[in-house]
Amino acid sequence: MQGRCLCGGITVSSDEHKEISLCHCTMCRRWSGGPMFAVHCGGGVQFKGLAPVAYRSSEWAERGFCPTCGTHLFYHLLPTDEYILSAGLFQTQHFELASQVFIDEKPDFYELKNETPTLTGQQVFDLFAPKP
């Protein structure tokens, strides 16, 4: 799977993925202006061209973008080295919406017709947060 940022200064490649999830958390919506259409790609992601700029958005994650055009590239989970890439990078890929997370933070001004499994923010943390 190959994609690129808006200006073409960064190309990204990953193994093939068919499913995406939507994150409705306040941070993703502030970052992108809407829900993040996310492709969970694991650790086998490669960036070529310009070096992405990363912003440490929490204790456990950073968000990356192109330093030239500002395209949102990734959400990177630091403890597991998992990259979650923006689906918009891959214009020729055919994705299926598989799930939605932080559904309890979704604002009322939009609705999706897709019926998918959903998780609240607390359910996400219960499932995926590192245990002490």
Image (cartoon, helix red, strand yellow):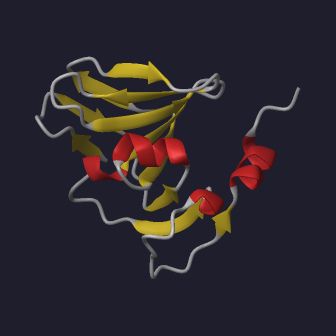
| Of residues 76 and 49, the one drawn nearer to the viewer in this rendering | 76
Q: In the image, residue 128 lies at what x, y percent?
A: 73, 43
Farthest-out residue, right: 132
Q: In the image, residue 8 lies at what x, y percent?
A: 12, 34
Where is 84 relative to 120, above or below? Answer: above
Where is 100 relative to 39, above or below? Answer: below
Q: In the image, residue 52 lies at what x, y percent?
A: 30, 22
Where is 132 relative to 85, above or below? Answer: above
Number of numbered callouts drawn: 0
Q: Is residue 30 left or right of residue 68?
A: right
Name which residue lies at 55% across and 80% down.
Answer: 115
Name which residue lies at 47% across and 61% down.
Answer: 19
Q: Is residue 54 left or right of residue 90?
A: right
Q: Is residue 108 left or right of residue 69?
A: right
Name which residue lies at 33% across and 36% down.
Answer: 73
Q: Is residue 74 left or right of residue 69?
A: right
| Of residues 113 and 73, the one drawn nearer to the viewer in this rendering | 113
Residue 45 sits in which quadrant? top left
Q: In the image, residue 50 lies at what x, y percent?
A: 20, 19
Residue 80 sits in which quadrant? top right
Name which residue lies at 45% across and 76% down.
Answer: 112
Q: Quadrant of the C terminus?
A: top right
